[in-house]
Each structure stands twice: as structure tokens, then as C-alpha cells.
Image (cartoon, grey):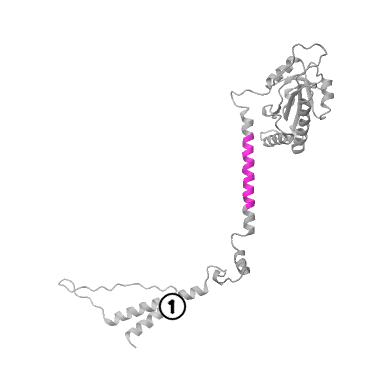
Amino acid sequence: MSISCKCAAGAARALKTSAAPRFTHRSIASYSTNSIAPTRTIAPGRTTCSREAQNAYFKAGKATARSAGQTRSFTQSASRSKLKTIDQIRARNKGGPFNLTAAILFVAAGAGLWAYFTYEKERMARKRIADQTKGMGKPKVGGPFQLIDQDGRPFSSDGMLGKYSLVYFGFTHCPDICPDELDKMALMYDKVTEQCGKVLLPLMITCDPARDTPKVLKDYLAEFHPDFIGLTGEYDKIKDTCKAYRVYFSTPSSVKPGEDYLVDHSIYFYLMDPEGDFVEAIGRNFTADQAAKVIADHIKDWEKPLKKETRWQ
């Protein structure tokens, strides 16, 4: 057997036993003859052996690559060139990352995030409104008072502590506005009670104490809601209470005894928190549903250390 055949056979045996054959490329340099370095030559037989070993290596590498391509696949789906029908294409794409289940989950997650951030935005807006009324240098709405309820019993601002209070100023001889607002107040109260329980105290303070006695208030408010509380008192005490709540009211100066008259006054519902602080004023532009939502949201936002289960009864 020639030297070249022996080299080729040895290279083939080495490739069979090696999992990842390697071949180190060697450069064959020839040095020119000069006076300093001797000439370096390589025998012709060894050169032929090296070339044949190199060719055997590349052939074995290609065979290994073809074998690996047949035994290992990077995907279990058929290639697009082999798909012939619509059913085959649908079957191939059925298990992909973009399907109906993934779309539903994506939409649900997006809707959940949108709802959460919307709620947080509204809650922070309500908190900002409530905190603005307690800032330094701002006019305070509300304050202490001593009046009489519709049963003739003393009622002070301390009776409002521990619950949210909805305070309205009006008078029983009002022909249209006060009845409409009290009807709306009854709807607001029922809606809030349905959502949050009996945590809201509905109060009406008269702006006409000369005619609105405790008995008159009791008969009048019974037509709107049995839980309404009417408050009256001496003129000076009513005036001080209206001033504390920033309520404008005026009665005609030249009224004869027994003569009917109207009282001009502010038309707002004043929402007070369980500590007696002003929260928000609700005007006529609010519907009963809108106003009830505002009140219920403020009640749900209440997080201060109060024993609600014992104080809100």
C-alpha cells in the first residue's frame, strides 16, 4: 500500500472515532536559499498525504452535517412549501403564538389595566378635591353650631361626627326649587344607603327660622323621606351657621306680620366627612345618580383609623 493510501485510511479512522473532527491547518513555508538560513523542503509523499487527509476531513464533515439535518429538526411543523390545502395551513398555524386564546388574554389584560388606572385616576382626583378644602389659607366651610331638630331636641355639630353628612339649606315655603332638590336628596340618600349602608346623615337647615318651627319642619320633611333631619333655631344662630357654611341668604326687610315672602339662598348640597371637614359641594347640575356616585366614592375612599362598624350605625 502506498504512503498516500495509508494516510487517507488513518484520517478516515480518526474521523469515525471523533464526535466533532477537527483539522488544524498548517501552512507550509519554504525558505529561500541564502547564506544565513538553510533551505527547508518537504518530501512529495508527505505533501500528498496532507492534501488527501484534508479532502477526507471535508467529505466526512459534509456527511455529518447531512446526517444531523436528517435526525434533528428545529421545528415540528411542515415547511410552507409542502403545505397544499387550507386545512393544512390552518393546522400548522393553530399552535402558533398568535391564536384566539392569546388574543382573548391580551384584550382581557388590557381591559383590566385600563379599568385599574381609570379607577386610580378618579380616586386621586377625589382625594385632591378633599385635600384642597383642608389646605392652609383656604376658607373653611362648616363649623360648630347649636340648633334644634324637628322634635325640639338640641342638635349640635358634634352629632355629625362619625358619619358622612349631607347638608342642605332651604325653607319650607319655597314653591319649586327646594321641593325639587329635596326629592333629589331623597334619591341620593337611598342610592348611597343601598351601596354603603346607613353611613350618611341627611340634614336640612332652614333659612327662615321665623316660620319654620320644629313642627313645621317635621311635617314638611316627612313628605320627602322619613330619615331626613330638619334643624331650626334662633335667627342669629341660623345666620352664624349659614355664615360658617358660606351660604348666602336674605329675607325681605319690609315684611308685615302674616305676609307671605320668599327667601333667596344658595342652592348646594354640602358633603362633610366623619371628622366634620368639608369634602365637596354638589350643585344643581348633578343628577341624583351622579351625586350619589360622588358621595359613595368619597365614602369608599375613607381610610382613616375610624371604627366604622361601631361608629357608623
Query: In which quadrant will I find the C terminus?
Result: top right
Q: Nearer the viewer, residue 297 or 277?
A: 297
Magenta residues (range)? 107-126
Quick one: which residue is furthest to the left in this view? 35
Under mark 1, the amino acid is Thr
Does residue 313 appear anywhere in the picture?
no
Q: Which residue is label 1 attached to?
A: 17
Q: Nearer the viewer, residue 107 or 197?
A: 107
Query: In which quadrant will I find the N terminus?
Result: bottom left
Could you tell me residue 36's position as x and y percent?
A: 16, 71
Quadrant of the rendered structure where residue 226 is? Answer: top right
Quadrant of the rendered structure where residue 238 is? Answer: top right
Quadrant of the rendered structure where residue 188 is? Answer: top right
Residue at horizontal 68 percent and vertical 20 percent from the top? 244
Residue 288: say if magenta: no
Q: Is residue 59 left or right of residue 118?
A: left
Residue 124: say if magenta: yes
Q: Is residue 80 left or right of residue 151?
A: left
Q: Nearer the viewer, residue 284 or 157?
A: 284
Label 1, residues with CA under 10 Å away: few <14, some 14-19, many ≥20: few
Could you tell me residue 74's position as x and y percent?
A: 52, 68
